[in-house]
Image: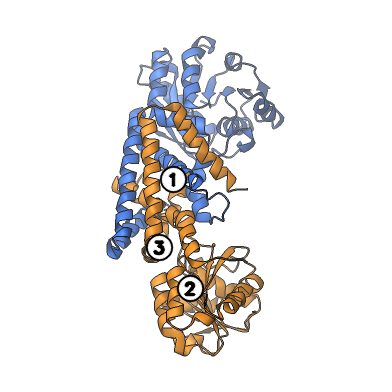
Chain colours: A blue, B orange
């Protein structure tokens, strides 16, 4: 689908970027709502949206496609309450980094036939409309998770078309449970590790000294929105905990190699890590 | 000092950049030596050096200042053997990320009066002359560690002047032991954590999937030279091991907060990390 009328709830780095790009791609009517009034005004001034609504329910009125671009807890709340306000036939999606609870909530709320979850791999540690960019989503991989209901596949097809044709992304269909297990390792784990490293440095009182680009990059994700990430971790609890447990073991392993002066084992460890990291740049 | 004749041993990302920038800053004679012959030829073709020597001893002949830009183990070996080849009055420095063993070796080799260690915070995960840039060192903080001998202070002053006036860096004087303790936390820890994270992902078989910029940045350092980092870790053993132990505890703590569903504690943890990370960008 290529909607002529779109509603975007949440106008931060992700929702603001999405609205803006859809607007530039020619979607005639893009209605926004933000829980932060100042962000709504910024989005309107930037012409990222054509109208600013004063409630989510008013924002979705008349929209063919509704995108929820708020943290997981708020997304679940909106899915549970927004149904009566949606136009008949309107499609609904979200952009959360966890998908199983979101898809489950859509089915529970009776919206399974009109819902498919989206997760664009285009996150940033920045927050707010000030970090919205009209090209943030261009070219990104977007995981699409179907609801599994009778009409859910059609809804997923429509949502995937929107990502591909309006936003120039690359949609990839994936089951929600598999998505959440994969992302625990490929995204959520890095966020937790970056935060742990930053917390250690904070507690050791290293805030006043010089850091090279290495530690800046390794801890960059720690600057991300704490509320959003607390939600993601808690909604993907067991997979994230498992990934963290493996990481504790890997850190203990390198510590023992260092303490034991095991030069060969240490080099092999670092070579394995190097091969992997160079491989993901290809 | 502003040498008219410089020798650079090691022409990788760091030594190659240093030679190149010194050449462009007007140092008349820049003699290079590389244990990798191809890199020496590349450096000569790029005019990053004016002469290519076929041994470290021949490279330092006639040089007022000698910079060792090889990994720690090779640096220690050169300090221990190069003394007889140095010109009378020539100064010697290195660029290793560990300083105490290097300064100690210089004193043991009877070079304390002519040596000061350098550590420019301008590292990269890339290796080789292909990653040398004539502006890599411009503006970087450079830690200078004195030998503590009678004339060592004069040597450190000369080396610091070279960094400041020829290379446009910002030298900061620091005791070698304090440097190594600080860098264990502010640099070496991130390297080890990035490698641990990459090793975990490698072992879990995630190499074929899509990664966002978050995991790419968090693991970037894992692409660094394994030999160099094995040396750094082993020459800064106890401080790096202590920093890693604290990090294991911090990861266990966030894992328990997630597993226990402790939303408030988890948000506080992430907020502390966020404050720290935002603070180091100022």
Q: Position of residue B273 (x, y in %)?
A: 50, 40
Q: CA distance from mark 2 to mark 1?
A: 30 Å
The residue under the point 47% across, 49% down is: A218
> How many numbered tags mark residues here?
3
Residue highlighted by disc 3 = B236
- The relative height of residue A192 versus residue A282 in the rendered view (above or below) is above
Is the residue marked by circle 1 packed among few (<14), some (14-19), or many (20+) residues within 10 Å? many
Q: What kind of element bears circle 1?
A: helix
Q: What kind of element bears circle 3?
A: loop
Frontmost residue, A62 versus B15: B15
- Say whether residue B203 is visible: yes
Label drawn at residue A61: none
- The relative height of residue A213 versus residue A162 in the rendered view (above or below) is below
Q: CA distance from mark 3 to mark 2?
A: 18 Å
Q: Earlier in the sequence, mark 3 or mark 1?
A: 1
Q: What kind of element bears circle 2?
A: loop
Disc 3 versus disc 1: nearer the observer: 3
Disc 2 versus disc 1: nearer the observer: 2
- The relative height of residue B203 versus residue A66 in the rendered view (above or below) is below
Is the residue marked by circle 3 packed among few (<14), some (14-19), or many (20+) residues within 10 Å? many
- Say whether residue A179 is visible: no
**Chain to which the residue tagged by mark 1 belongs:** B
Label drawn at residue B215: 1
Residue highlighted by disc 2 = B69
Q: Position of residue B68 (x, y in %)?
A: 48, 76
The residue under the point 43% across, 24% down is: A116
């Amino acid at each position: 689908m290529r909607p002529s009328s779109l509603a975007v709830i949440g106008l931060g780095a992700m929702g603001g970027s999405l609205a803006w790009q859809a607007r530039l791609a020619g979607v005639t009517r893009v209605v926004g709502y933000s829980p932060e009034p100042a962000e709504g005004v910024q989005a309107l001034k930037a012409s990222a949206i054509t109208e600013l609504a004063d409630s989510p329910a008013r924002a979705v009125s008349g929209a063919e496609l509704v995108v929820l671009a708020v943290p997981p807890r708020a997304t679940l709340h909106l899915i549970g309450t927004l149904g009566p306000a949606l136009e008949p036939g309107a499609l609904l999606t979200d952009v959360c980094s966890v998908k199983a609870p979101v898809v489950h909530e859509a089915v529970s709320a009776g919206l399974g036939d009109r819902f498919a979850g989206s997760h664009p791999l285009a996150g940033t540690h920045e927050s707010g409309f000030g970090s919205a960019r009209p090209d943030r989503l261009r070219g990104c991989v977007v995981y699409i998770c179907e609801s599994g209901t009778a009409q859910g596949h059609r809804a997923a097809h429509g949502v995937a078309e929107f990502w591909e044709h309006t936003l120039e992304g690359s949609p990839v269909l994936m089951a929600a449970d598999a998505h959440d297990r994969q992302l625990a390792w490929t995204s959520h784990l890095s966020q937790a590790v970056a935060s742990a490293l930053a917390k250690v440095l904070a507690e050791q009182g290293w805030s006043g000294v010089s850091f090279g680009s290495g530690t800046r990059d390794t801890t960059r994700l720690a600057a991300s929105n704490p509320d959003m990430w607390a939600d993601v971790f808690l909604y993907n609890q067991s997979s994230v905990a498992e990934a963290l447990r493996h990481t504790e073991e890997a850190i203990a392993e390198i510590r023992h190699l260092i303490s034991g002066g095991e030069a060969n084992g240490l080099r092999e460890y670092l070579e394995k890590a190097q091969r992997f990291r160079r491989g993901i740049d290809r």
